Image (cartoon, grey):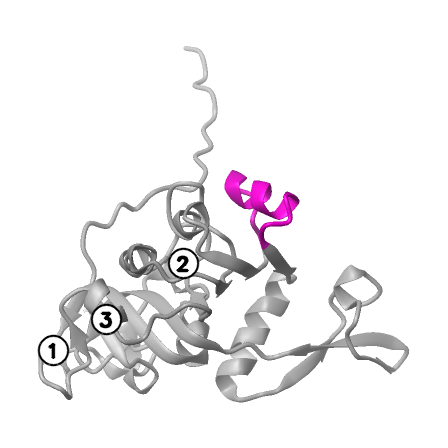
Amino acid sequence: MTNASKVYPSARAALEGVVRDGLTVMSGGFGLCGIPENLILALRDSGAKGLTVVSNNAGVDDFGLGMLLKTRQIKKMISSYVGENKEFERQYLAGELELEFNPQGTLAERIRAGGAGIFGFYTRTGAGTLVAEGKESRVVNGDTYILETGLTADLSIVKAWKGDTEGNLIYRKTARNFNPMMATAGRITIAEVEELVEAGTLDPDQIHTPGIFVQRIVKGTDYVKRIEQRTVRKRTAA
């Protein structure tokens, strides 16, 4: 790897010199779809503690961000949905974990705003509820809006289907979810990809995240493709 290269040989190497205690980390994905599996594992193995993690959810108990909860490396979650993780529930109810809940659309817009350099925005979502407590409000045309601030992170870790050596990324179907927004909102963004190709290989019109937002990139390995919640119906009797 040359000094000018964005490509790193492993997730562990990609995190070197970046990870420390007390980081704010954005982690892409929705449920277990499109999560940066290799980078989460490397973050766990780094031993960094006191992390604030911005993610739609917290994975499941033994996979994804759930592994960082198990090792007690996360002190605070900024999330929308955490219903699949028993350890999350235990830590929160025991007062061992801070939680900042956001309506899902509000969370997405806060991340997008942060990446766009926008301080904040007014929304009707959450007005008149616990979500509005402590926040500035404004009445416009008879409706109450609350001020939500943009979110940024020290580090964003994202997952893409395909990327090139310049950090240009293409996401596949619903794995796109929070990843593009988070890639823009991190002071340092590290992407892991399933396929890594040479610069100039990707069709520019198909690129979702331009490489200017990505500082480091690594080709992931051993993807599990787990299903978060399998629902089946009973077979109809013959």
Residue 50 in the image, given as x and y percentages of width and height:
48, 62
| Image depth: mark 2 or mark 3 in front | 3
Query: Which region of the structure is painted magenta?
Result: 81-97
Q: Estimate the x, y position of residue 45 in percent, counting from the top left.
A: 29, 55
Which residue occupies the foreground of this view, 136 or 69?
69
Which image quarter holds the C terminus?
top left
Q: Locate residue 70 relative to residue 122 in the image: left or right.
A: left
Q: Label for residue 174?
A: 2
Answer yes or no: is residue 131 visible.
Answer: yes
Q: Secondary structure at mark 1?
A: loop
Q: Residue at x 59, y 58 (%)?
A: 80
Would you say 132 lies left or right of 204 here?
right
Give the mark toward the camera: 3 or 1: 3
Contact (Cβ within 8 Å) of mark 1 with mark 2: no
| Residue displayed at 31% across by 87% down | 212
Residue type at mark 2 is Thr
Q: Any mark on residue 14, and which?
A: 3
Q: Position of residue 24 (x, y in %)?
A: 47, 71
What residue sits right under mark 1 in the picture? 198
Query: How far apart, in angstroms, are the residues tagged by discs 2 and 3?
Result: 25 Å
Find out whether the residues at labels 2 and 3 contact each other: C-beta distance under 8 Å.
no
When the figure is inspected, residue 112 is found, relative to residue 80, above or below; the finding is: below
Where is residue 60? Give x, y as percent.
Answer: 45, 43
Would you say 97 lies left or right of 158 here? right
What is the CA distance from the residue labelled 1 to the residue labelled 2? 25 Å
Counting residues from the start of the chain, the first of labels 2 and 3 encountered is: 3
